Amino acid sequence: MNFCLLFPPAVAAAGNNKMSSQPGQEAPPSAADFSAATISKKALKKDARNAEKAAKNEEQALQPAAAAEDPFAENYGDVLPGEILPKAISGEPWTKVGHLDEAAVGRSVLIRARAHTIRPVGRKMAFVVLRQGMSTVQCVLVVSADAGISAQMVRFAASLPKESVVAVEGVVSLPKEDLKSATQEVEIQVRKLYCIDRADPNLPITVEDAARSESEFVRAEQTGEKLVRVGQDTRLNHRVIDLRTPANQAIFRVQYELENKFREYLSSNDFIGIHTPKLISGSSEGGAAVFKLEYNGQPACLAQSPQLHKQLAICGGFRGVFEVGPVFRAENSNTHRHLCEFVGLDAEMEIMENYFEVCDIVDGLFVELFKHLNDKCKKELQTINRQFPFEPLKYLDKTLRLSYEEGITMLKEAGTEIEHMGDLNTEAEKKLGRLVREKYDTDFFILYQYPLAVRPFYTMPCYENPLYSNSFDVFLRGEEIISGAQRIHDPELLAKRAVECGIEKSSIESYVRSFSYGTPPHGGFGVGLERVVMLFCALNNIRKTSLFPRDPQRLVP
Amino acid sequence: MNFCLLFPPAVAAAGNNKMSSQPGQEAPPSAADFSAATISKKALKKDARNAEKAAKNEEQALQPAAAAEDPFAENYGDVLPGEILPKAISGEPWTKVGHLDEAAVGRSVLIRARAHTIRPVGRKMAFVVLRQGMSTVQCVLVVSADAGISAQMVRFAASLPKESVVAVEGVVSLPKEDLKSATQEVEIQVRKLYCIDRADPNLPITVEDAARSESEFVRAEQTGEKLVRVGQDTRLNHRVIDLRTPANQAIFRVQYELENKFREYLSSNDFIGIHTPKLISGSSEGGAAVFKLEYNGQPACLAQSPQLHKQLAICGGFRGVFEVGPVFRAENSNTHRHLCEFVGLDAEMEIMENYFEVCDIVDGLFVELFKHLNDKCKKELQTINRQFPFEPLKYLDKTLRLSYEEGITMLKEAGTEIEHMGDLNTEAEKKLGRLVREKYDTDFFILYQYPLAVRPFYTMPCYENPLYSNSFDVFLRGEEIISGAQRIHDPELLAKRAVECGIEKSSIESYVRSFSYGTPPHGGFGVGLERVVMLFCALNNIRKTSLFPRDPQRLVP
């Protein structure tokens, strides 16, 4: 049996697919949802040309094994999409590739993974490296009547397109020499091999190419070997393949752990997670950085930050709240650190005595985050490091806090021209980061008490010196990642400050009114998830830490 | 000292509030963000009229205590917004209202909370009930030279507007009789009392009114007492006050715990949390239920579900993924269970042998969720029950699974006319819920193997009988809350099914192409967070479980 049966003819009735008019929470996505992955034909053509060469090698032996006269035909073959798994291996437990080690030697295991690389050796032997998440393992097929492996089966394996999903049953063994082609130290002597889903042999990019580190290119330069370099844009056009590289598998696990710890730390400090609306009432004065849309005949826009609603949650009686959710910026910023949609980590809390309570939360939270990542994501960080080498982040157990004035003094003493009481530009921030690292041996610090004039109107002025404000920024490897402050909770002072800052009173009337029903002093901060991961791992582009990034030029896939 | 000093004059320089052109992650919200809370003037006027009566009582004694000749003037007064806390009580630890019990009797405590109700007794005594989250405690002021309490101080307390934020220092004592007006069994003998933020005495609604249960109205009917009934719309217009009711404080804690457990259960089953883009490429065929917008000159829309991208994440090499994030539906559905923006809990996973693996996850997840809420949120559920009485949910340790055919048979046997191979309408779903409850004593069950014709085109047909599909719905108290299925992972079959369902091939080309690079069999499910909380607590309206709900008529606050 070769599992090459025809799929039962699809049903006539199926044409009458009436979608429920009262859809459940998982209503069918619209046509737009499915056209969402469209990439320009030109881009695809270009990528196809690049990939053509790589694909040629695989175009040779793509016919499935002729099974007619093979006594071991049951041990391999293609599985039909509706069938999922051949009965020959059904019901047995699955082993994870990453769990395969010397302890498993001699045991029979069942694995489902992707064909990473395939290397035939003559007609009687083939190596198939299987990849699952960040791990790879080498599988060996040798023609042998005892093992039930025919020459046809070896040919079947050797002709598998890369990236096909396969199920393998085999015996774990120690390889004769160290394996450089796989992460696992053991290999698998294949007994059965089924192709669960056959990949297109003309892949636009390969995971092998997409996973190369800079050092591989340097070595190749020396040896004269020609390697395909996959550009950032091509990667993103084919993100479903690009995401399969070990580094990308690691990056999104780090991101997930970061979010988990963020939630856990704030939970244990008496915050609760909330969800605020992203659709908000919008007027024409919304400004250029706002996405506008129509909401049942009313003008609306997408929230640029949960600022308003997290403050309203504090007004609503919650002592401390946080939110993890999308934030939308219609900015035409084509930089390494800007996205038009990113994941905001926001928090807001009652202040009991002093806005340094907010700094204390930031301090404790981030030190715990860094420790947690270094501890829990060792393997992930090593994996990222292999493709994108980076120096571990330097941070202090008690985060360094410098006042704005101290920061400015450091910059001036180092000869930087800087406007007193002005904001720091990107260059000054980088410079300050270097100076702080030299002096205090840390990549992470808080700069507090900014001039009032460079902060938004709703920032609380310093009580002792109202030229300054109860605000702070936080820096990671010389880039600003967090902005935070105490907010004005008094409606009169808020309205006064708005007018002083040239904001029309009528436009913020309801915002101000929300604070008239008894509001505790409060403050908070916001940080972008992608930016923290990027800087923690010293990656060079925020697009590397967004699953499906959105920038001014990219809305797909 | 009475803390009534003038606030230092705001700064001239503050007018020059240049917002950074490279805003940090917490960039200043736009003007639109702040006008977002706008409510129509008409609605406000109406609410104001309703509240006028209630406010009258408070209009009498609003002048702050004349402090001139009071030897105890330091023990009370208003605090300036910039000052946060009077020095007289600075540096001491804060006690939570909910933690006050008999064990604290005799101790001096410091509390910050809102003035829930204020009741003067003659000129020498006043009761102030303070509220914090779900808890309230009664504070007592009696004129006494020993305790440092003057008649002016009692007047100051008696004249506090409801909802003002106050800081109280006092000694915990046992009341002479049982307190019906507060949740805590002890009371506080006030020594110091400062108003941190004075509320507008003309509140549009009071928390006392908004927190009344139906049984209070029944009692009032009998005694002839007149109570203010706060309508759903009025509540939402003044959500920052409405959210302060004990029931609302409890609802959003339950919601938070539900989300936490959802994440924890899936984490422990080898899923990772992801974030998919909400801005997706949109074409004009998007359909009526889609919010459309312009994205840097391209047509775009808001994702109606993370369906596409969570499937792409599986294509991208992640074994199991989940997402908690906003979902947008531009439907004009004005029902008790539809929102235009809600929080979707979505999951997608590789299937190894059978789509029942997805049902297993749903089963285990929800049974754990229910147990967790009943266990961890006892106080919250009691609090909700006091205002909105409900029967605890009935569920089985191993969730009941009925096939679609079994469900149809039960309905037919009960005399319900129902189209065979058709979808269930809301009425049939409710009926089936009742029948299942009678027969199996559960409010929670899975109905699986729906006809292929009533499911979206991307649903995997049953291998054994392609008139049916590998799909399921899940019901809670007679309402569908979850929809799930195995998806077609084979690009050819997917394209074929799309055409059979009348979908233009070109519109889904890139979606189909994503599956050509080696895709494991997979499936998943989606559920709305607000809907689960609503049905778990048997609340009558989904607007009660959304922090700031969005429906066709409501985009504010």
Image (tube, coloured by chain):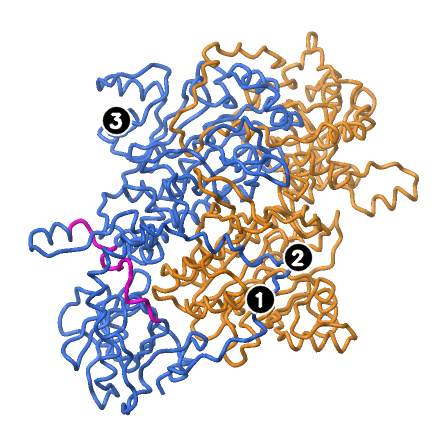
Chain colours: A orange, B blue
Residue wearing tag 3? B431
Q: Amino acid at mark 2?
A: Phe
* Sequence-earlier tag: 1 or 2: 1
Q: Is residue A303 left or right of residue B212?
A: right
The x, y position of residue B327, in whole percent, is: 47, 39
Q: Residue at x 76, y 53 (%)?
A: A389
Q: Is residue B51 left or right of residue A395?
A: left
Q: Residue at x 40, y 31 (%)?
A: A24
- The boundaries of the magenta stretch are B198-215
The kind of secondary structure element at disc 1 is loop
Res A455 label: 1
Is B203 magenta? The answer is: yes
Q: Amino acid at mark 1?
A: Arg
The x, y position of residue A454, in whole percent, is: 60, 68
The subunit letter for the residue under badge 2 reads A
Q: Quadrant of residue A196?
A: top right
Question: Magenta span: helix, strand or loop, mainly?
Answer: loop
Q: Rate crowding at label 2 as few (under 14), some (14 to 19) or many (20 or more) other CA atoms within 10 Å.
A: many
Whether residue A200 appears in this view of the structure is yes
Camera-near label (1 vs 2) is 1
Q: CA distance from mark 1 to mark 2?
A: 26 Å
Camera-near label (3 vs 1) is 1
Tell me: residue A29, above or below residue A215. above
The x, y position of residue A443, in whole percent, is: 68, 65
Q: Is residue A265 left or right of residue B404?
A: right
